[in-house]
Image: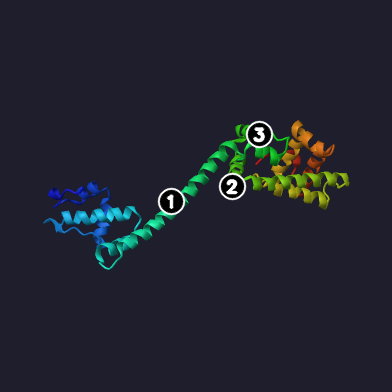
Amino acid sequence: MLDAADADGLTVGQVSTRLGVTVRALHHWDEIGLARPSLRTAAGYRLYTAGDLERLHRIVVYREIGLGLDRIRAILDDSTVDVPGALRAQRAQVTERIDRLKQLGAGLDRMIEAHERGLLLTVEQQAAILGPEWNPDWPAQARQRYGVTTQWLQYAERSASRGAEEWQAVADAVAGLERALGDAMDAGVTPGSPEANRLVEWHREIFASYFPLTRQMQVCLGRMFEADPGFAAHYDDIRVGLASWFRQIIDVSARANGIDPDTATWE
C-alpha cells in the first residue's frame, strides 16, 4: 500500500526503490508525458507527490499484465475508454500466451527426455514397431557411448518430435530398404551399377531420420555392419553375405565420389 504521509517530495531514486522500476523507466515516462513529477527542487531535480505515486503504481500494474504504454495512457487519461473491455482483451491475450508457454514447456520436457533416453516409446511400442529382435536397453547403451557426440544431439532432437506413428514410418522405410538390398543381391546387382548406387543413396536418405550421414560416415557404418557380429548377423539373416555386399556397394559408391574408403573417418 502507498503511504501518502511521506509520499510528497520523493526523489526518482526513492520512487524507483518503492515501485521496483528503474530510474531509466521513470525518466522515459516523464519524457513522453506518461508520468511526470509534479514538483521540482530549486536545482531542477524531480520530486514525486502522493498523486504522482498513485499514477505510477497503476502504470506498473498495467505494465505487469502486458499493456503497452499507449494503451496505459488511454486508460489513465481518456474517460471514454472501456477499461473492463481493455482488461478483458488483455486477459484473453495472456491466456493465449499461457497456452503457448505450456506447449513450449511440454516440448522442452520431451526434448530433455529425448536427450536422456533417445527413444520416447514405451517398451511395448518399441517391440511392436521395431520387432522382436529389438532390445529396449539399446538406446540407453547408445547414449552412454555416444551421448556427447553431435550425432546423438541431432538424433535426440529428431526423436523429441516423433511419436509411434512417425517411428513406424521410419521402421517401414528401413524394412523396405533391407528387402530391396536382399533382392538386389539375389538379382546379381553389381557394386558401382546405377541400381547399387541408388540403394546407397536411399540408405543415406533413410539414415537422415536419425542424423545427417555424410558419405565418409556411411563408409564407416558399412564397415561396422560387416565387422560387428550383431549387425552382420542381422543382415546375413536377410541374405547370407548381405553385410559384406552392402559394405562393398557403399565403398564403390564412395570411391566414385572421390572418397578413399580405407581412410574414411567419422565426421
Q: Are marks 1 and 2 in contact (CB under 8 Å)?
A: no
| Callout 3: SS | loop
> In the shown orientation, is residue 99 left or right of residue 266?
left
Q: Which mark is residue 98?
A: 1
> In the shown orientation, is residue 111 left or right of residue 219?
left
Q: Earlier in the sequence, mark 1 or mark 3?
A: 1
Residue 230 on image: x %, y % = 75, 32
Identify the residue at horizontal 28%, vertical 50% (top origin): 22
Q: Earlier in the sequence, mark 1 or mark 2?
A: 1
Residue 137 on image: x %, y % = 65, 32
- Residue 249 in which image quadrant: top right
- Furthest residue toward bottom: 80
Q: Amino acid at mark 3?
A: Pro
Q: Is residue 95 above or below residue 139?
A: below
Q: Nearer the viewer, residue 246 or 74?
A: 74
Instruction: Inspect this view and state whether residue 148 appears.
Output: no
Q: Nearer the viewer, residue 111 or 14?
A: 111
Q: CA distance from mark 1 to mark 2?
A: 21 Å
> In the shown orientation, is residue 89 left or right of residue 249?
left
| Callout 1: SS | helix
Q: Amino acid at mark 2?
A: Ser
Instruction: Inspect this view and state whether residue 19 appears.
Output: yes
Q: CA distance from mark 1 to mark 3?
A: 36 Å
> Pointer 3: what residue?
136
The 10 Å Cα crowd at callout 3, few under 14, some 14 to 19, many 20 or more, is some
Q: Amino acid at mark 1?
A: Ile
Q: Which mark is residue 161?
A: 2
Q: Which mark is residue 54?
A: none
- Residue 216 in which image quadrant: top right
Residue 48 on image: x %, y % = 17, 54
Q: Are marks 3 and 2 in contact (CB under 8 Å)?
A: no
| Callout 2: SS | loop
